[in-house]
Image (cartoon, rainbow, N blue to C red):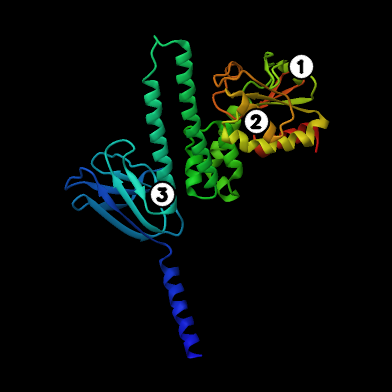
Amino acid sequence: MKRTTGILTALASLLLVTSCSSKSYRLHGEMEGATATDTLFLITDLEKGLPFDTLLLKDGKFEYEGEVDSTTICLLRIKSTEESIQPFFLEPGDIHIQLKKGQGESKIKGTPLNDEWQALNDFGFENQNKLQQIMGQFSDSLPDTEKEALQAKAMSVMQEMTDKYFSTAEKNIRNELGFLLVTNPTILNEEQVLTLINKMPSQMRHRKEVKGLEEYLKSSMHDAGSGEKISDFKARTPEGKELNAMSVISQNEITVIDFWASWCQPCMREMPHMVELYSLYHDKGLGMLGVSLDDDGDAWKDAIKKSHATWPQISELKRNSEIAQQFGIQAIPHTIIVDKDGVILVRGLVGTELENFIRERLGS
């Protein structure tokens, strides 16, 4: 009996220690080329940029400890140059920061969000270097076929960057890394940002930064071209037959023109929802027309088959799609909803917003 009591007492003590230290963090690191007079400011209010505290450097090294009730997005600012280091996350644990002068050379590690944030930044800089190498090969003297091949390579690298950014934001949509990526979308298009906002927990979605961004995107994007009649366009189906868009559009009360590609991960993640919507509302007047930016015919056909997309599909089989250019589309997925006469009703809807619009137009 005494043995059991002793074990419980020891366990209670351990839990107490763990509980008391669970909010603790240790921030430490070194600064390349630091002088004896250099000072670092810890910025926790990114909007106002006011220092929360000062970190003193000794032999180029710094150390700071404290506790946080919740994860906070922070900056380090060098007093002498007013240069700010990329955001990092003040969260429980041991955070190590290596400050270097070259762009993208500073490193942050030691805690879950900081490790994932650093991995995303490393991926981004690595792909930027790839893009620079590809662009460095461009020349006016190159044959058109070689120019197109280089352009396809560049677009593939850019799509990899977009997919990585989106998937990281989606994975972390309930924490501060997701919040940071959504409110600083850089390479994401409007539809992708709105898709991520729709996935946010309610409390985060009601932050002023997110609400302001959502309102701006909806007002600037969804009504773009509203009321204008589209020009007819055509391309080939998977069976090789030429299909005019208006021959599909004129048969339905409303038609969703869906710009997508098999190599676009966000497009493929959205596809099951599109299949469900088509199944639910096709008999009530919903039509869909897929416009693929694939350049690989087999990959395109395979994606259609695997996703069970039974609506009409067309493609020019090139990423630099003339149809996409016609509608000013720079990133996918992208939707344009038109009536049976081809008049644009709204564009850029995804996820629940797309479903709500269809339900309002065609009934539940």
Disc 1 packing (10 Å; few <14; some 14–19; many ≥20): few
The one of 141 and 74 positioned closer to us in this rendering: 141
The mark found on residue 302 in the picture is 2
Give how far across and how far down residue 269 sits, in percent: 62, 38
Residue shown at 66% from the left, 35% from the top: 271
Residue identified by numbered label 3: 114
Q: Nearer the viewer, mark 3 or mark 2?
A: 2
Q: Residue at x 41, y 44 (%)?
A: 119
Mark 2: which amino acid? Answer: Asp
Q: Looking at the picture, how far across and down is residue 98, in whole percent?
A: 29, 47
Which badge, 3 or 2, comes first in the chain's sequence?
Answer: 3
The residue pinned by badge 1 equals: 247
User: Mark 2 to mark 1: distance in Å?
Assistant: 25 Å
61 left or right of 246 in image: left
Please state, as top left, top right, bottom left or bottom right, where the C terminus lies in the image: top right
Q: Earlier along the polypeptide chain: callout 3 or callout 1? A: 3
> Which amino acid, mark 1?
Ser
Between disc 2 and disc 1, whose residue precedes? Answer: 1
Q: Please give left or right for residue 164 compared with residue 364 in the image.
A: left
Q: Is residue 56 above or below residue 83?
A: below
